[in-house]
Image (cartoon, rainbow, N blue to C red):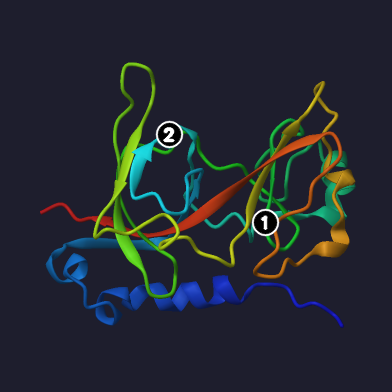
Amino acid sequence: MKRHLNFTRRQWLASALGFLATTFSRPLFAQANIRYVSPQYIAVLAPGDARKGTGAETWGLWREDPGPIGVYLLFYQTLQKAANIAPAGWRFNIDDWWLDENGLIMKAPEFPIPAGEYYVTNGVDQSSLLTVEKPDADGKQAWSLSDDKTIGNVTHGPCRSARYTPEGASGTCSPEGANRQVFPLKPEETPPPVQGCNRKDYAVLIVFGFPAEI
């Protein structure tokens, strides 16, 4: 059976996040002044049951959805011929590249995530205020979620985000080694291993707003 591309998430988010304030009746929304924004995305490395911790210096931020500006694995050779410049203008790095749930090579997020406060959601029924602290003397960044939420609560399940880096010398980890047949991924599936690559799987949090200045 032909597998359909997982664009439902992005189509739904464009309309759904606009009325979060009216669909959630929690104190977080009842009392907060929120500046709503077009969805942004945070790539997170943290245990699913964690409510606070350190290590946010390893997190990244996509200020725009990296999917629509991504390049399908099928067109990787075309990307190479274009001097590793994607049609959207971002540069592909063979020593540090990302895949999503549809088999799209994504623009890398901004590292590290800027310190600040972010209203985050799983895109369905869970939300929280994420606070990312400024780096300490060792460059470590602490973080915490409000309302007793966990990373798992506010992770958007349909999004998969895997980062590939070489196991050995530069250039030994190539998207050509990725199995295109497994895409789009089912909800319980993780991105495939690629020969010559280390892979890190990041949880994805959707940012829908920031505290408004009064």
- Gap between marks 1 and 2, in whole Å? 23 Å
Residues packed near mark 1 inside 10 Å, few (<14), some (14 to 19) or many (20 plus): many
Where is mark 2, residue-wise?
Answer: 55
x and y, in percent, of residue 179 in the image? 87, 55
| Residue annotated with mark 1 | 100
Q: Is residue 97 left or right of residue 159?
A: right
Per the image, label 1 sits on a secondary structure element best described as loop
- Please tell me whether mark 1 or mark 2 is closer to you in this view: 2
Give the image quarter of residue 208.
bottom left
Residue at 41% across, 63% down: 153
**Upstream in the sequence, badge 1 or badge 2?**
2
Please name the residue shown 71% across and 70% down the image. Answer: 186
Q: Is residue 4 found left or right of 116 in the rendered image?
A: right
Check the image and report above or below for 110 versus 72. Answer: above
As shown in the figure, which amino acid type bears the numbered disc 2? Gly
Q: Please, what secondary structure does the residue beneath circle 2 have?
A: loop
- In this picture, residue 22 sits left or right of residue 140: left
* Residue that lies at the very extreme toward the top in this rendered image: 137
